[in-house]
Image (cartoon, rainbow, N blue to C red):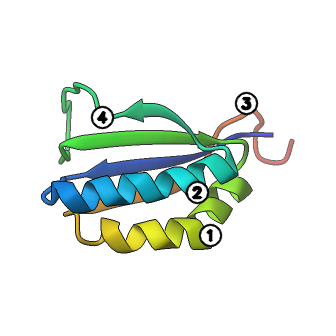
């Protein structure tokens, strides 16, 4: 079964709200087994528009990734994320090598 991922890009403009968001999102990520693969770090924008902070979080599958987002624990955190600055978030299924119809 393919894993599920969150791919987030954030321009942090309010550090205190971001700190609160991170402390609260940790509760949801622990409950749903979210594991950071990318959390900030140096990057080079090769093409398109970028944001200052980039994150990739892995979950056991797409259903778990979606459930984490919809959970009361994460929704408590997301109220603070709305005050942080511009955010893009995609919840996406991973690729397990199977072709459609396999």
Circle 1 crowding by C-alpha within 10 Å: few under 14, some 14–19, many from 20: few
> Which mark is first along the chain, 2 or 4?
2
Rendering quarter of residue 79: bottom left
Taking the spot 72% from the left edge, 58% from the top edge, the residue there is: 63
Please, what secondary structure does the residue beneath circle 2 have?
A: helix
In three-dimensional space, the C-alpha distance between marks 2 and 1, rounded to whole angstroms, equals 7 Å
Q: Secondary structure at mark 4?
A: loop
Q: Nearer the viewer, mark 4 or mark 3?
A: 4
CA–CA distance between discs 3 and 2?
Answer: 29 Å
Q: Nearer the viewer, residue 14 or 8?
A: 14
- Name the residue tied to disc 2: 28
Q: Is 78 left or right of 15, judged from the image as shown? A: right
Marks 1 and 3 sit apart, C-alpha to C-alpha, by: 29 Å
Q: Quadrant of the C terminus?
A: top right
102 on left or right of 85: right
Q: Residues within 10 Å of mark 2 (few under 14, many from 20)?
A: many
**Contact flag, marks 2 and 1 (Cβ < 8 Å):** yes
Are dots 4 and 3 in contact, CB under 8 Å? Answer: no
Foreground of the two, 36 or 31:
31
Q: Can residue 92 be seen in the rendering of this structure?
A: no
Q: Position of residue 60 (x, y in %)?
A: 72, 42
Q: Mark 1 vs mark 3: which is more N-terminal? A: 1
Image position of 60 with respect to 28: above or below? above
Viewer can see residue 41:
yes
> In the rendered image, which residue does mark 1 sit on?
71
Query: Foreground: 97 or 65?
Result: 65
The residue carrying mark 4 is 40
The dot on residue 97 is 3
The front one of 101 and 97 is 97
- Disc 3, SS: loop
């Amino acid at each position: 079964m393919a894993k599920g991922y969150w791919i987030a890009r954030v321009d942090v403009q309010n550090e205190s709200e971001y700190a609160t968001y991170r402390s609260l999102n940790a509760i949801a990520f622990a409950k749903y087994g979210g594991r950071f693969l990318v959390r900030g770090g140096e990057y080079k924008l090769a093409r398109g528009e970028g944001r200052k902070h980039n994150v990739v979080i892995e979950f056991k599958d797409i259903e778990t990734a979606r459930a984490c987002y919809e959970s009361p624990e994460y929704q408590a955190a997301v109220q603070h994320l709305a005050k942080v600055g511009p955010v893009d978030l995609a919840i996406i299924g991973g690729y397990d090598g199977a072709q459609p119809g396999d």
